Amino acid sequence: MPETGAPSPGRLSSTWVVTARELGSYFDSPIAYVYATAFLVLSCGAFMNSFFLASVADMSAYFESLPFLLILFAPAITMRTWSEERAQQTFELIVTLPLRSAELIVGKYLAALLFYLLILAGSLPLVVMLVWLGDPDLGLIAAGYLGAACLGALLLAGGVFVSSLTRNQVVAFVLGAALACLFVFSGHAAIVEVVDGLTPSWQVGTRLYESVSVLPHYQAFTGGLVGLGHLLYFGLLSGFFLWMNELALRQSRM
Amino acid sequence: MTVIDVNQVTKTYGDLVAVDDVSFAVGRGEVVGFVGPNGAGKSTVLKMLSTFALPTAGTLTVDGLDVVEQALEVRRRIGYLPGDTPLYHEMRVGDFLAFVARARGLRGGDLTAGLDRVVDLCDVGEVTHRRIGQCSTGFRQRLGLAAALVHDPPVLLLDEPTHGFDPLQVMAFRDLLTELKSERAILFSTHIIQDVEAISDRVLIIHQGRLLGDGPVASLATAAGAPGAGLEDTFARLVRTRTQPRGTGGPDA
């Protein structure tokens, strides 16, 4: 006779069940392959152009272009995370499974992060090429990749959160891109100057640069400086967005 | 023994009263049919029992567990088929069932046994490699049912379970519920009167969010002043005699 239905699995195990399904769903759709190809062509293309012009065996051109590419690519990865569940009405199915909301959120987030890291790993042949052609600073390159992973982790967490606010994927994409714009462009010198010029007494541009912008932290990594403060910035902000996602899910049960 | 207990439950969406002071209980070994027109509040009650929606007032318990305070434990005990059978259309049939079984905590031999059991029980074995979106409506309904049963739950909540079934599939479904009912409490909603008469031990009649009747069809007919009448006539009489005009009904109740 059935008593409790099923045993209670561990949290990690349940999270991984969600991650595996989500990751599989990326590859079930041809859009994933289009994203991956477009991302690799644009990011590696920017690098090759600069590599042949400057003839320097490093990855700085690749890492410099990455934040700007991710303004569009991070929300493209995350836009369907929750909005598609709502649009297809599978939201009711998944939230009535015996999974904690944290397991659902982290599971979906990890899938987006793993998908991004897989695409990022597609640029590793560039490193092999640099080693073959010259004598690059591999420590600097490793720090750059760590920064790229942290940058992606933050923008994806923001994208997963905004996807929980709407059932429309396009709206989720636009909101995610707007959020990514805030994080990236608030660190751009020209933008900071313009915003400071518009608000001379408040210096809003400088304040945003110092408090919100992702670029100073990311550029520390690409410059070879892996500091605890920078890691905390990415970790805490990513955690903040996942927590906001938890609040949004809780609200949806009302 | 009472397994599902709904006590003075009200659910409102803004000014709309979707469920209005509803109380009933379902015991183990019972199949209870929830009948009423579209928008009557059937699905809203099932959504609250499944932990998907919160009640505005009142309490709901499953196996003695409060659906608000002990939602995770309640979810382990229920098999829930939501209305319109939401499924991941891009997934393959076998992958979907395995995902639901794993999410419900089944691993190793239990997982294999659970999958084998529901594939056989719900007759979804012939196209496990096909994508769900390419399957017929009736097949998708059976798949949703298989997903609700994969962990062998003691409580089944089924929202319009025969939607999209052909007559043969309806008969097979009736047989399935008869087979399952001895060990479970089963509550299903429908607006197809024949389903309720054929399957249910007891009927709940709901209209405009209010419970108008609770009992076997014969008792309800007597209470409605038409002894020996069928459920359709009984339902019509109860609606006429026990409701007042008012604006109720949830957004997708």
Image (spheres, rainbow, N blue to C red):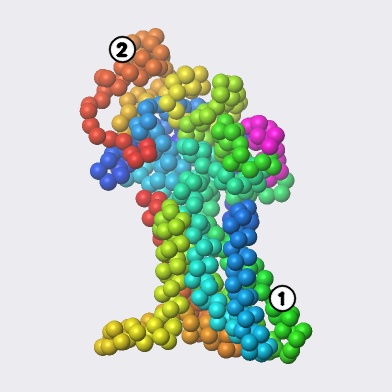
Query: In this view, which residue lies farthest toward the top?
Result: B228
Q: Residue at x 48, y 62 (%)?
A: A160
Q: Residues within 10 Å of mark 1 (few under 14, many from 20)?
A: few
From this view, report whether residue A245 is shown above or below residue A138: above
At which x and y percent is residue A232? 50, 80
Horizontally, residue A56 falls left or right of residue B80, namely right
Horizontally, residue B99 falls left or right of residue B47, namely right
Is residue B241 among what the camera can see? yes
At which x and y percent is residue A137? 68, 89
From this view, report whether residue A200 is shown above or below residue B38: below
Q: Is the magenta stretch mostly helix, strand or loop?
A: helix
Residues rendered magenta in the picture:
B110-127
Horizontally, residue B97 falls left or right of residue B200, namely right
Q: Mark on residue A125?
A: 1
Is label 2 in a helix, a strand or a loop?
A: loop
Q: Which residue is drawn at 51% across and 38% down?
A: B85
